[in-house]
Image (tube, rainbow, N blue to C red):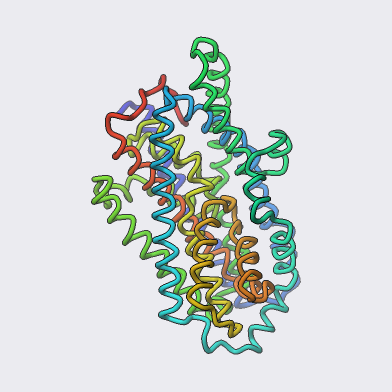
Amino acid sequence: MTEASAGEDRKETRLQYWMLGGFLAGLVLGLIVHSVAADAAWVALVTTYVTQPIGQIFLRLLFMLIIPLLVSALIVGVADMGEARHLKTVGLRTLLYTVVVSSISVAISLALVNLLQPGGGIDPALARSMIAQSSEGAASIVAQAGESKTGVEAVLAIVPTNFVAAMSANDILAVMFFALFFGVGFLLVDPAKTATIKAGFEGIFEVSMRLIGLVIKLAPIAIFCFMFNLAALFGWELIGRLSAFVFVVLLALGLQMFGVFPLILKFIAGKNPIAFFRETQEASVMAFATASSNATLPTSLRVAEEKLKLPRPISRFVLTIGATANQNGSAMFEGVTVLFLAQFFGVDLTLGQQLVVMLICIMGGIGTAGVPAGTLPVIALILASVGVPPAGIGLVLGVDRFLDMCRTTVNVVGDLVAAQVIASTSGDELPPEPADIVIH
């Protein structure tokens, strides 16, 4: 290890400690404020005009750079496959892995909800009160869900008629389809004729990574603001009232994280699970802090290449796709939430209906936006489809931020597990390594 790289590692370690410190300070201070001055006017002023804007600015800076990062990483990742046969091999294995592991995760979540019945025995009057308190937030989510495309329209929307319009609308799936299709073009054209444009996309990737590295230095302040808002406005009272729901979500996520993933790593990827979790802890911390798979993507890419030592074409392709298409934690949360609210409102779902919910959750986990609260519109759609009042989503708004942080951690770790599995099972079929690109 060079002296420069050792210095970078020390800086990264200090940043992780600062992020943890921001999390704990925001949580403790927020709980104190909630305990002594929960209804004070100044608390609303501080959260509305100070801490919330700071947190949103941090996320906006990240999201501003996500589209160029996604496009450049996926195009270069596909181009680096070298031959179409490599893309076919890696792509099919990634798709198969995503469907199988997502199915396992949703099956676990539905089994736990049916077994533990977290929605039973809750006071309906309390539910109505909580829905009323969260009516504005629930209404906006339901409205957003109503605007979402379904069925054939959703499939057609994946293929954009205007790439620029897809970027401006933040249509991640459409943007990724274009980048994937454009990257395939590199495999079909003489490399000598595309070297310049490929170098341009590699430059965009490097610039995006460097700028995101600067933004990440603001993470401790943003994390403090996120946690202060959560604790000062809601305290632990709301979490206490929904403790059974929170417990089942955390149990499901925990089984996936510390049960399913280690088994996959050990018996399929041939990787020591303890070493894997140690090497990927930076990405886990970032995922937990930002509650966004997309915002964590730069860190995941760097961890995959520098810590896990995965081939660059594999890591870029699998992780870029996985930021939107391999979200096990989101699929699990959707399944638990839908059945919880069905139990709460006394809607008895048949086995067939639960299988439909499972299928939609798998697809939802593949297509959910990798941003904070990206699962909520999907949940609203599922609720309406099975006869559960979509406004009931207001019940979980108070605890969603914390659970969003937890499920995003599972999403990101799941992406890294997928990259490890695909790299380990590709063997001699791996494409050649491209020229070295330093990721900061």
What x and y, as percent, mark residue 293?
52, 49
Residue drawn 75% across the image and 71% down it: 41
How many numbered marks appear? 0
Q: Is residue 181 above or below residue 241?
A: above
Residue drawn 25% across the image and 46% down it: 271
Asked whether 432 or 122 is in front, the reply is 432
In this rendering, position of residue 45 left or right of residue 51: right
What x and y, as percent, mark residue 138?
70, 69
| Displayed quadrant of residue 438 | top left
Q: Is residue 37 shown to the viewer in this render?
A: no
Q: Is residue 384 above or below residue 169?
A: below
| Displayed quadrant of residue 13 | top left
The N terminus lies in quadrant: top left
Asked whether 419 or 31 is in front, the reply is 419
What x and y, as percent, mark residue 434?
41, 21
Q: Is residue 398 above or below residue 308?
A: below
Q: Is residue 128 shown to the viewer in this render?
A: yes
Find the residue positioned furthest to the top. 192
